[in-house]
Image: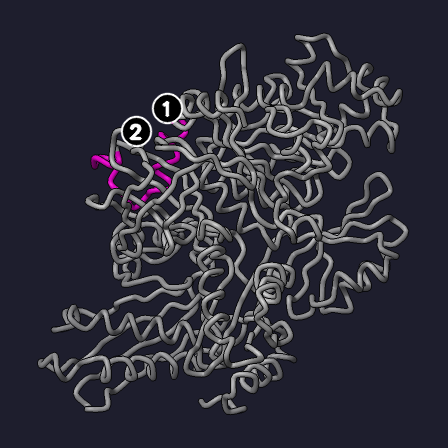
Amino acid sequence: MAKDRTELMAELMKNPKKIRNICICAHIDHGKTTLSDSLVAGAGMMSEDLAGTQLFMDFDKQEQERGITIFSANASMVHEYDGDPFLINLIDTPGHVDFSGDVTRAMRAVDGAIVLSDAVEGVMPQTETVVRQALRERVKPILYINKVDRLIRELKLTPQQMQERFMKIIKDVNNLILKYAEKEYAEKWLVKVDDGSVAFGSGYRKWALSVPYMKKTGITFKDVIDLTLADNEKELQKRASIHQVLLDMVIGHLPNPQDAQKYRIPKLWSGGDLESKVGKDMMTLNREGTLAAVITKVIPDPHAGMIAAARIFSGTLKRGQDVLLVNQQKIQRAQQVAIYKGPQRIQMEEIPAGNIVAITGLTDAFSGETITNTEATIQSFEAIKHIFEPVVTKSIEPKSPADLPKLLQYLRQVGREDPTLAINISEETGQYLVSGLGELHLDAKIERPLKEKGINVVTSPPIVVYRETVKGEGPTVEGVSSNRHNRFYLSIEPVEPSVYQAMLDGKIRQEQVRKYLKEVGVQLYENGMSKEESRNLVDIYNRNILIDGTKGIQYLHETIELVMDAFKNIMDKGPLAQEPCTGLKVKLMDCKLHEDAIHRGPAQVLPAVNDAVRTSMMKAKPTLLEPLQIIRIDVPDELMGSAISQVQNRRGSVINVESELGSTSITSKLPVAEMFGFEAQLKSATGGKGFYSLVDVTFDKIPEEIRLQVIGRIRERKGLQKEVQE
């Protein structure tokens, strides 16, 4: 990049009204990376002839070999709009559901999103997921309908039919916005053809159009069809360049960081005080104020060590500045600060609020960490939570004991880079469990990188992690401490279905509950819990609720932390098979405590509470919940029967079947335990013409006829006694 362009970027960074932070998001293979290429080429950062084939933003070796995006990639570019230069910080995100955690993290960094949809396939399951992810982070969407040339060349649609196709996609996207956006943004953020918040074109052929641009230039649908059929898309590209039309749409319809932060900060920093100095600094994007930034990505660089990508919400980050990692309370030095140009970084002296920055030197940083000035005290940002939980687990062991330190180091590093990977290292038992969103997720982020590093490991077949819960109410059970001086009376029952659903939907706060007891109590009451119980809330952990039903117990305030610890311990390892618990309400009904604190320490309280909860749970009809994937299968009409057979052979059920343009979409629900190898079987049964996409992950009670068999298998794998002790 020429020096004057770098200087111009440094200048634009200081003017928030001239900045747009955006991402491109879509279903897999709808053309995100090709579109990113075309935009980057239009900005003069790569050859226009290579755009669409170079895949500039897929710079990882695995991405190039697999032909899919695995890691989100950043690029900053300058675009002129009505004669004025603007700085656009772009993030290209993955489309495969196994890597959608990267999309969630990218959404924290940006204020607007280009939602891309394939003109032929329309709105697909992952399109719904990315819209949902954007709206959860209060990121405003606009719509780009890609691969329009396929409607002309392959489907031979008339201008009227093309418009009908576009209107269906627009309607489907708007239905998603109405479904997932908060009330105050739903109507405001609908995409519309007339105002130019919708564009259509071909990322590969490098042209795009919107209705305002068509009115301005006089180009018609007929021109598009004629030029496409005449193989003269170079002319179309000249008259309607994709980067011009799309980046004009970005600047015209997506917010600058100053405007966006006014409504995003109350959501992303909900635990903080907006009236405090740092709160006001972020709400006004004060570049002279307290530094407040959130790290959204951490990747290793062979030359520079760990590189952290961060969005700066207030203050200015300077080269060589010491910063505080808030959650870890560690001070580290930002050795270099830079902006992104795909795989390269352009060093800067300082980068002010409103920008996305690359930082080297923060060796202990992790995705979701908050950074600030060393002398500042600020509340950390809300955790970056992914929509889906990890459901596939593998056990990993090094072939050679000498490789164990290297394996541990890599697992800790990858856990910081990708929080959607759950790493459970039990150094006592020597078992290392890694949980991810799917088999490909574990292969791409764990197994293959280990092999490339020369660390030979043995991996188990995929393990499914179940959840333990109860179907009925358990009796109040007494737990007695070993010194006989303390007694705890606890009972267990299922959480109200409406409250559990509200927790799943993110309507009830589940982090830092102790700090916001009153607020969370109100949320519980509003979603169906009784007033008395919601007032007596003690804690929420993994969608399990602890209630204090006691009255006037002396010394309880000194002991309640230990009761909470015991509650969390058993919620992590239920009595049936030591699987995590969910949807349980544990009530402390009464207790008798010794007056001397020395006689009610952890060794007395933890086992007593644990025994009482466990016994009550075993008498409350305990069962397992198994993870299920709701998937959409797309096949030609004539192969529908073959696809449905594959679902039914795996304990699956068909929810819905729809046909359009000779293709059938089958929405099904299948247990994750039966999904391994499903893709290969589906391809085989449909001659390679069937494929599936993940719509959602849910948990349902395991069928009674296989419950004991599954519990036995899990207990055997974990080295527990085969029979569950009552």
Q: Amino acid at mark 1?
A: Lys
Going by the image, does 606 lie left or right of 116? left
Whichever of labels 1 and 2 marks the residue nearer the N terminus, that label is 1
Q: Is residue 264 inside the magenta stretch?
A: yes
Where is residue 101 drawn, in percent x and y?
53, 51
Q: Residue at x 51, y 46 (%)?
A: 104
Residue 166 appearing in the image? no
Q: Which image quadrant is residue 190 in?
A: top right
Circle 2 SS class: loop
User: Which numbered dot is residue 14?
Assistant: 1
* Picture quarter with the N terminus: top right
Where is residue 661 drawn, in percent x and y?
84, 38
Comparing 201 with 483, the one in front is 201
Q: Is residue 507 inside the magenta stretch?
A: no
The main secondary structure of the magenta stretch is helix
Where is residue 354 drawn, in percent x and y?
39, 31
Specify start and end residues of the magenta stretch as a single range.
Answer: 258-279
In contact (CB < 8 Å): disc 1 and disc 2: yes
Residue 383 vs 138, above or below: the answer is below
Comparing 138 with 412, the one in front is 412
Q: Residue at x 61, y 55 (%)?
A: 98
Give the class, few, some or many, for how many residues have Cα within 10 Å of label 2's Cα (few <14, many ≥20). Answer: many
Circle 1 SS class: loop
Give the class, few, some or many, for how many residues have Cα within 10 Å of label 1's Cα (few <14, many ≥20). Answer: some
Where is residue 668 drawn, in percent x and y?
71, 57
* Picture quarter with the C terminus: bottom left
Going by the image, does 146 lie left or right of 132? right
Q: Which residue is mark 2?
A: 287
